[in-house]
Image (cartoon, rainbow, N blue to C red):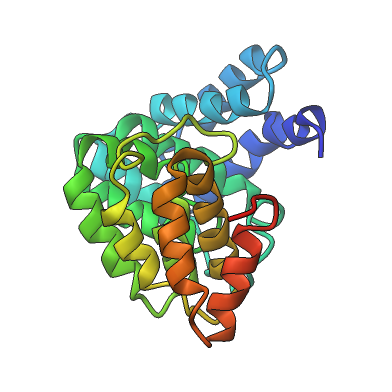
Amino acid sequence: MSDYSLAQHFGVNLAELLSSKIKAVYPKFDEQKYIKNIVSKVNDLAYSGRIELHARELNSALNLDYKSQIEILTSILGEENPNETGMFKNYYWVLPIGKFVEIYGIDDFETSINAIAEITKRNTGEYAIRVFIRKYPNKMLEVMRNWAKSSNFHLRRLASEGLRPKLPWASKLENFIDDPKPVFEILELLKEDNVKFVQRSVANHMNDYLKLNFDAAKELLGKWAKSKNQNTQWIVKHATRKIKI
């Protein structure tokens, strides 16, 4: 899907959709201000710029403290996505909420991480989480280790996807490139996962490291290649599909 066609979902139509959801739980929401500001600014923006605009205008229209804002925004998320797909189709409207946390939540770790966990169960927290990994690397590694052991496959996937150094449409995450051991310890927890959504993330993650720290990635994949687990075997094959090791 082109950037243009994606962008069409994030104009005044999204402002009206989010307004209806927010008004249902917070009647004081200034929907007129929100929609008016989106209409006046959105046309010159592409996909990513539109998502950020919605986040910033939500902050302006929700004239409350951050915790109260997040309580409202997470209350509109609805039922969790039961599928491995649909995050960017059925739940596309959640993207500005993830961007909201990324922009405004960096100083409230607990509130923001809990919000990202709920967001990723519908859409994805893989972009919002990266600013927290940069600022709180040790705390985030502990969070990711716990998510890697979660019964929720969306959280298990985020434990891998959020730490990817070369995540598409995101700036490079350089924290662990030279010493990926802490990340590899988390991927070890996921290497036998029976959900393809998680397997694919782990494989793509290791493919990133084959490009950035080949020796470390080769060593780990060589160890995994000896496993008789079919899920691990799929991950190794997919991770090395374009790179010979």
Residue 55 place in picture, x, y as percent: 48, 31
Residue shown at 36%/75% (left/top)? 150
In this rendered view, identify the residue nearer to me: 127 or 95: 127
Classify residue 104 by image quadrant: top left
* Vertical side of 121 occupied by 36: above or below: above
The answer to whether residue 193 is seen in the rendering is yes
Residue 47 located left or right of residue 171: right
Residue shown at 69%/60% (left/top)? 86
In this rendered view, identify the residue nearer to me: 32 or 129: 129
Residue 222 located left or right of residue 139: right
Residue 216 place in picture, x, y as percent: 39, 52
* Vertical side of 90 occupied by 18: above or below: above
Residue shown at 66%/51% (left/top)? 88
Residue 117 place in picture, x, y as percent: 38, 59
Residue shown at 28%/34% (left/top)? 64
Image quadrant where one finds the N terminus: top right
The answer to whether residue 81 is seen in the rendering is no
Residue 33 located left or right of residue 188: right
Classify residue 223 by image quadrant: bottom left
In the displayed image of the protein, which residue is found farthest to the bottom?
Answer: 228
